[in-house]
Image (cartoon, rainbow, N blue to C red):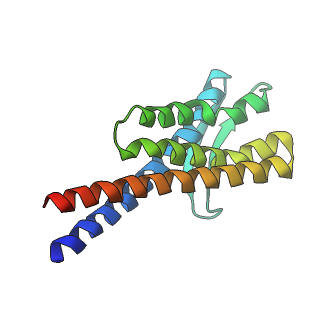
Amino acid sequence: MKSFFKQYFQIFLYFMLFNLSILSVTLTLHESGHLYVGYLSGCNGRIILIDLENTKTYTEVKCNMPVNEVILSLGCFLFVIPFAILFLLLNMPEKNFFYVILGLGLSTSSLDILGILNNDVVFYTLVTLGTFLVIYGEALLINDRVFMTKEILVKL
């Protein structure tokens, strides 16, 4: 019985740590996309991943010439989407992190899109779609991992 609870605790811990890692990498790639597009546009900047005063992440970009704000804002997808696609190449339950990463990417980019379009409907649609993708991906992950664990426990 101890090994049963130990096994499920390890799976729970695995999901927590892996999800935290995925969130951190996705946020970093999101902000890196803004910064990279800014550099390509001739700007300088830096990424603020944790701002305890404002409790948010952002990229400060200083440009000496006029820059297309739309291109700068859409840079958030530059690295996040290829990172998500990499997970589709996996042959394990972790391939479902594609949906989680895509959902996180859409949710975190919703404020950037709001700055471009100034449309609340688009903002809430992106947040809702992103949230559903995260939930869908997590549900697939849990389902696949639990059934895989049952197979392992039966073999033991």
- Residue most extreme to the bottom: 1
Answer yes or no: is residue 63 visible. Answer: no
Instruction: Look at 77% across and 24% down and name the residue there.
Output: 65
Task: Indicate the quadrant where residue 63 lies.
Answer: top right
Can you give x and y, in whole percent of width and height, for residue 29 in the image?
A: 52, 39
**x and y percent of residue 42 in the render?**
66, 22
Question: In the rendered image of this protein, does residue 78 appear above or below residue 3?
Answer: above
The x and y percentages for residue 71 are 73, 28
Residue that appears at 38% across and 45% down = 94
- Is the residue 95 above or below the residue 12 in the image? above
The tally of labels here is: 0
Closer to us: 138 or 116: 138
Q: Left or right: 67 with respect to 100?
A: right
User: x%, y% of residue 90?
Assistant: 37, 35
Horizontal side, residue 123 vs residue 42: left or right? right
Quadrant including the C terminus:
bottom left
Q: Quadrant of the N terminus?
A: bottom left
Name which residue lies at 76% across and 50% down. Answer: 125
Residue furthest left in the image:
156
Q: Residue at 42% x, 53% y: name it.
A: 141
Please, is residue 85 above or below residue 98 in the view? above
Towards the viewer: 50 or 93: 93
Return the residue nearer the eye: 128 or 80. 128
Is residue 104 something that shows in the picture? yes
